Amino acid sequence: MKTITANVQNAAPTESETRLRTENITIKYDDRVISRNLSLSIPDGSYTVIVGPNACGKSTLLRTLSKLLKPTEGQVLLDGKGISTYKSKEVARKLGFLPQSSTAPEGITVANLVAHGRYPYQSFIRQWTDDDEEAVASAMRLTDTSELSHRFVDELSGGQRQRVWVAMALAQQTPLLLLDEPTTYLDIAHQIELLELFKDLNEQGRTIVAVLHDLNHAARYATHMIAMKNGQVVGQGHPREVVTERMVEDVFGLKCKIIDDPVSHTPLVVPLGRERPSDH
């Protein structure tokens, strides 16, 4: 994947300056409460990673931040306004969202699927332009999917499809990008390439919010981390403040040692594993 070079300061803003935040939201599925009275701010210009065990509310929070799920109480604020007051296309020009799993229309090519990322900019008056063409081409170059452009999406491997979906999200060219487990289906090399791409985009100025399962990946790439348990935020801040032996055991039920990553000098989680008689 291609590299983007830029320098951007990632200082956390005050609450009034934060583009995306929640105020005392309660989220339910049917009658089951997922999160209650949840308030948090996504620092502008950050690479925010949300971590936590399965079914703790990470993906639900991301869907709520993207307007796909409406809280039963409280509100999500985007640029100081309730996100529910925006039309869908307005939100899609400000905020891109890659869900955990997506289904492409049958028989659609890669190029046509990525072009769907330009839908928020289309109207009866404004049709397809050279800018749209370049946005699609750029997104495919960045995700190494250009050579797949004429292939049908349903022919691709899981990893290839995932990179195509990422390309579609990038084609939206939004200042905020929300990603729910973007490295799913990818081998380790493509995982790192994608996480490096998001780092480049962040340094170029985009705010990235990603749900990741791998704590070590999260600690290496995040500039801001949110740890969740049972639908609530139990820790947030710089990874070095959040990723502690106590947090990992409390949130994930895993005894570990935290050491310094010899490459990135970020926290590295080393599981202790189950104690066996031979260990004595």
Image (cartoon, helix red, strand yellow):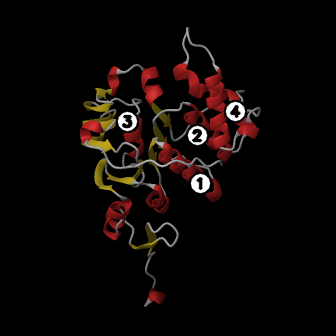
**SS category of the residue bearing label 4:** helix
- CB contact under 8 Å: marks 4 and 1: no
Visible residue check, residue 114: no
Disc 3 residue type (three-letter): Leu
Name the residue type under label 4: Val
Residue type, numbered disc 1: Gln
Q: Of helix, strand and loop, which one carries label 1?
A: helix
Residue under numbered circle 1: 191
Callout 1–callout 2 Cβ contact below 8 Å: no
Q: Measure how far apart labels 3 and 4 are at the Cα level.
A: 27 Å
Q: Horizontal and vertical percent for residue 161?
A: 65, 40
Q: Which residue is mark 4?
A: 110
Upstream in sequence: badge 3 or badge 1? 3
Image point 60% across, 14% down: which residue?
127
Q: Residue at horizontal 37%, vertical 53%? A: 224
Q: Earlier in the sequence, mark 2 or mark 4?
A: 4
Say how many tags the image has.
Answer: 4
Tell me if residue 164 can be seen: yes
- What distance separates the C-alpha of mark 1 from that of mark 2? 12 Å
Q: Residues within 10 Å of mark 3 (few under 14, many from 20)?
A: many
User: Which residue is rendered at x = 63% and y = 17% of the image?
Assistant: 128
Residue wearing tag 3: 65
> Which residue is denoted by mark 2 in the rendering?
166
The image quarter containing residue 29 is top left
Q: Secondary structure at mark 3?
A: helix
